[in-house]
Amino acid sequence: MAMYSRAKCVKVLKDKANQVLNILSKLSIRDRNLKVKRVDDYVLIPIRDDVNHQDISKVLGNISFSICINEFEEIIKHKSYKDLLKDKVPSQVLRLLPRSFDIVGDIAIIKLKDRAVIKYGDEIAKAIMSIAKNVRVVYAEKPGLKGEFRVKKLTHLGGERRSWTIHKEYGIKIYVDIAKAYYNPSLAEEHRRIALMTHDSEVIADLFTGVGPFPLHIASIRYSLIYAIDKNIEAIKCLLNSITMNKLKGRIVSINADANDFLNVIKDEVLDRVIMNLPHASLTFLGKVLPKLRRNGYVHLYLIASNEDDALNKVLNTYPSNHYSYTVNNVRRVIDYSPHKYIYRVDVKRI
């Protein structure tokens, strides 16, 4: 239920509201505990009670305004999970905790670099579940990924004893086992962006599909054939579960295999599009992939670089375009990777 308070305010015409609001906010004159409101052609901006008409005149100059009293809705400040921990863990531990955490389905994943923090895991988990009401499981994630399949290094902190969940991207249900298969919720926009680039009737290969977010997005909107390849059988099992949970237009063929083996078997010039989201190694596959593309087919290649030119040069220097007959249509920064390093997508077109 909304709460209201009477307060002093600055009344200005709506076409001057943004300008005045910026000035009052920068000078800490605006009362940030109350919401700004509009009345007819005017905007009412709540201000501190100790500020008078002369003070406002000095900062607003020639802008016409008046001072009045009105009722304003109070801004509810939501507590963070760290606020709930202030009296439950030592201050030095609180400083080591990150401000935020990831949520995959109903599982929260918090990045904890210091092992000393883990012993307060139960309190941390309870605080997170108090703030995020839909969370049923909490894990701590250690830096880096483990093994060939790039799975997270996880420690259970609290909640139910399971690592599987159902995550949603754009209404698409994705079955994920965070302890057994790689999945990055930060790539949801990228999954959709690639899907929107595709067309009906395309034959597509996702060489490092993981739990299959790219194929699921594509098949949800296109009548296409998508080969989803991954060496991790657990990732493929997740994808098979997702296929049964979604109404798909396209057909997904899941293949538990090495990408090299798939490329050795498939004929030349049969694919319209290839997705290679393996930033550390995708470049090593480009030479094998290009012959498999039809003319005017695309490769969406992901790699780690410091800037757009660096990403472009890594492709051009590894595979000279005069030898492989391709052009680079686009280079796009996708997400941050580390300080001064980013994951880029390079869109390569065969000609």
Image: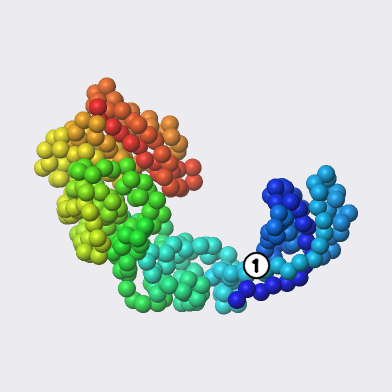
**In which quadrant of the rendered view does residue 196 lie?**
top left
Foreground of the two, 185 or 216:
216
Determine the residue positioned at 42% across, 33% down: 310
* Amino acid type at image mark 1: Ile
Determine the residue positioned at 30% across, 40% down: 300
- Residue 205 point in image, percent of width and height: 21, 45
**Up-down relation of residue 292 to residue 52 (above or below):** above
**Residue extending farthest right:** 54
Taking the image as shown, residue 19 lies to the left or right of residue 97, namely right
Looking at the rendered image, the quarter that the C terminus falls into is top left
**Up-down relation of residue 175 to residue 288 (above or below):** below
Foreground of the two, 328 or 277:
328
Judge whether residue 93 can be spotted in this image.
Answer: yes
Taking the image as shown, residue 350 lies to the left or right of residue 131, namely left
**Up-down relation of residue 263 to residue 138 (above or below):** above
**Up-down relation of residue 97 to residue 322 (above or below):** below
**In which quadrant of the rendered view does residue 302 lie?**
top left
**Residue extending farthest top:** 322
Determine the residue positioned at 38% across, 54% down: 188
- Residue 269 point in image, percent of width and height: 15, 34
Q: Secondary structure at mark 1?
A: loop
Q: By what rule are the colours in the image chosen?
A: rainbow
Determine the residue positioned at 49% across, 69% down: 117
- Residue 22 point in image, percent of width and height: 71, 50
Foreground of the two, 157 or 190:
190
**In which quadrant of the rendered view does residue 344 lie?**
top left
Residue that badge 1 annotates:
75
